[in-house]
Amino acid sequence: MKKDRKNYRSHWHCVFDLKYHLVLVTKYRKKCFTPTILQRLEILCKEVCSRWDIEMIEFGGEADHVHILLDMHPNVMLSRFINNLKTVTSRMIRKEFAKHLDQFYWKPVLWTPAYCLLTSGGAPLSVLKKYIQKQGEGKREAIHRHPNNKTI
């Protein structure tokens, strides 16, 4: 895929710019992430994203959650990607930091089943609404006229 003007991406007959803000929270909101675990999570997330041909733009987190900013192709099935990301990171973090995480969880868990996914970037919603509402202004009267020049 290549980057076009205005940072749009293109692929075959598709031009797009899809950015998502993903928030993942630890099970029971346990404050189990240390700076070392967060660094490892960032590396793992980058690797998973790379396998899915997704660009991880930004990563950040605190003791009980992480925020990830993603740029992806419209063909990506978001729920499958997020499930894969959570599965891989959970398994690897629980394996590599088992002793630390045993203090917080007695079952093999890391993430809550839920997630928050928000679209981001581009124009604000109010600007888009106005733009869509103005489409065809000046042409509407012509469109709604009958061939005999009578307004419908």
Image (cartoon, rainbow, N blue to C red):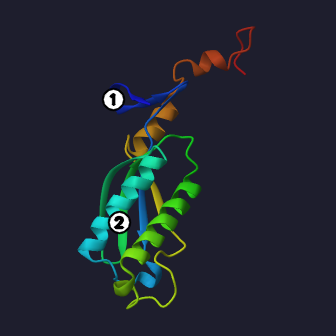
The answer to whether one can see residue 61 in this image is no
Q: Residue most toward the top?
A: 148
Residue 51 in percent (x, y) is at: 47, 48
**In the shown orientation, is residue 36 left or right of residue 114?**
left
Q: Which image quarter holds the N terminus?
A: top left
Above or below, 42 relative to 95: above
Above or below, 8 relative to 114: above
The answer to whether one can see residue 67 in this image is yes
**In the shown orientation, is residue 135 left or right of residue 42?**
right
Q: Helix, strand, or loop for circle 2?
A: helix
Residue at horizontal 60 percent and vertical 19 percent from the top: 141
Residue at horizontal 43 percent and vertical 59 percent from the top: 22
The CA span between labels 1 and 2 is: 31 Å
Residue at horizontal 45 percent and vertical 42 percent from the top: 18
Residue designated by label 2 = 41
**Circle 1: is it few (<14), some (14-19), or many (20+) Cα within 10 Å?**
few
Q: Nearer the viewer, mark 1 or mark 2?
A: 2
Above or below, 9 relative to 48: above
Seen from the viewer's position, the closer of residues 109 and 94 is 94
Above or below, 48 relative to 91: above
Q: Helix, strand, or loop for circle 1?
A: helix
Residue at horizontal 30 percent and vertical 53 percent from the top: 58
Specify the amino acid type for callout 1. Answer: Lys
Residue designated by label 1 = 6
Q: Quadrant of residue 3?
A: top left
Residue 48 in percent (x, y) is at: 44, 55
Q: Quadrant of residue 9?
A: top left
Seen from the viewer's position, the closer of residues 136 and 12 is 12
Q: Which mark is residue 125?
A: none
